[in-house]
Amino acid sequence: MLLKNQTILITGASRGLGAAIAKECVQKGANIIVHYGANETAARRVQKHLGTQVLGCIGEDLRKPGAGQRLWDAATQLAGPITALVNNAGIDPASPLTGRIEDWRQSWADNLAVNLVAPAELCRCAAGAFRQMGGGTIVNIASRAGERGDDINHDAYAAAKGGLLAQTRTLARALAAENILCYAIAPGWIDTDMAPKGGDKLALALSEIPLGRMAAPDEIAALTSFLLSGTCPSATGATFDVNGASYVR
């Protein structure tokens, strides 16, 4: 029960990787708060499946200004002091260089809001609370794209995730002396419903992964729970690559 006595806010936890992280944290003894963007039905399904260690579900559209603060306030009102934050929620709308400039601007705005600004705001809230509590842990789910770049149609996504990596490192350097630990995980393709399922797109995705398969959500969930456990605090500030050797630094 490595996470016993922890209360963890997990964003984007109604499905996919977020739901896998929620399950892993509950199995390790934590209480959790499930955030969802729009699909309350899926979030309630996760809550029902995981039981009473899910303290509640909170809906918040992270594209909207102030969403991070509102979510944090709602979570603390629901659950009391939060000991850890997992910024997992993310979107990847295309931002092609061709087409209507209005569409390009909207894609950049949405990518930055959900993938960088809202997580950064949540980190700000968490850091303030953790300082008063004497410590806490932040795990930011970034992306391989934030390190190596992405295809030409997803530069906004790559830029936002790169910013999240930089913020994680900055917070780790600034807050380690106060026992506030900050880690980033940078997955490549994950086998969720957001990944390609067949045809040329799947073949292309797999062709660049030496391991020959996408990462399973449970793999990343296990790494997340390990980082949350406080087992290796000296790793604060590190980015953990989980991409089947498709990008090796």
Image (tube, rainbow, N blue to C red):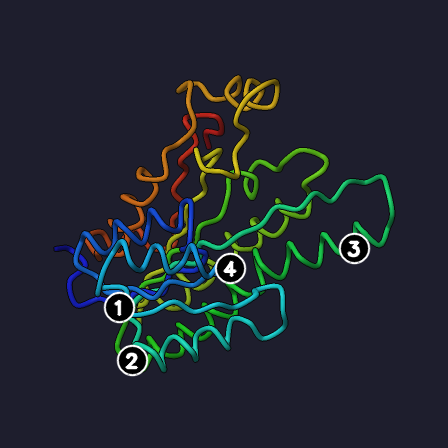
Q: Which mark is residue 167?
A: 4
Residue type of the residue flagged with mark 2: Gly
CA distance separating discs 1 and 4: 23 Å
Sequence order check, earlier mark of 4 and 2: 2
Q: CA distance from mark 4 to mark 3?
A: 23 Å
Q: Nearer the viewer, residue 31 or 40?
A: 40
CA gap between label 4 and label 2 equals 26 Å
Return the residue at label 2: 80
Residue drawn at the location 33% of the way across and 46% of the way down: 20
Residue under label 1? 7
Mark 4 or mark 3: which comes first in sequence?
3
The residue that appears at 33% across and 50% down in the rendered structure is: 21
Query: Left of 57 or right of it: where is 189?
Result: right
Q: Residues within 10 Å of mark 3 (few under 14, many from 20)?
A: few
Is disc 2 in contact with disc 1, using a CB cutoff of under 8 Å? Answer: yes
Sooner in the amino-acid sequence: mark 2 or mark 1: 1
Name which residue type carries label 4.
Answer: Gln
- SS type, badge 1: strand
Please say if 58 is above or below 132. above
Q: Is residue 184 left or right of residue 64?
A: left
Q: Splitting the image into 4 quarters, where does residue 222 fall?
A: top left
**Furthest residue to the left?**
1
Instruction: Report the residue marked by disc 3.
Output: 105
Q: Which mark is residue 64?
A: none
Q: Position of residue 214 (x, y in %)?
A: 43, 28
Amino acid type, mark 3: Arg
Which element is circle 4 on?
Answer: helix
Say which label, 3 or 1, has the lower sequence index: 1
Around disc 4, counting alpha carbons within 10 Å, would you say few (fewer than 14), some (14 to 19), or many (20 or more)? many
Q: Amino acid at mark 1?
A: Thr
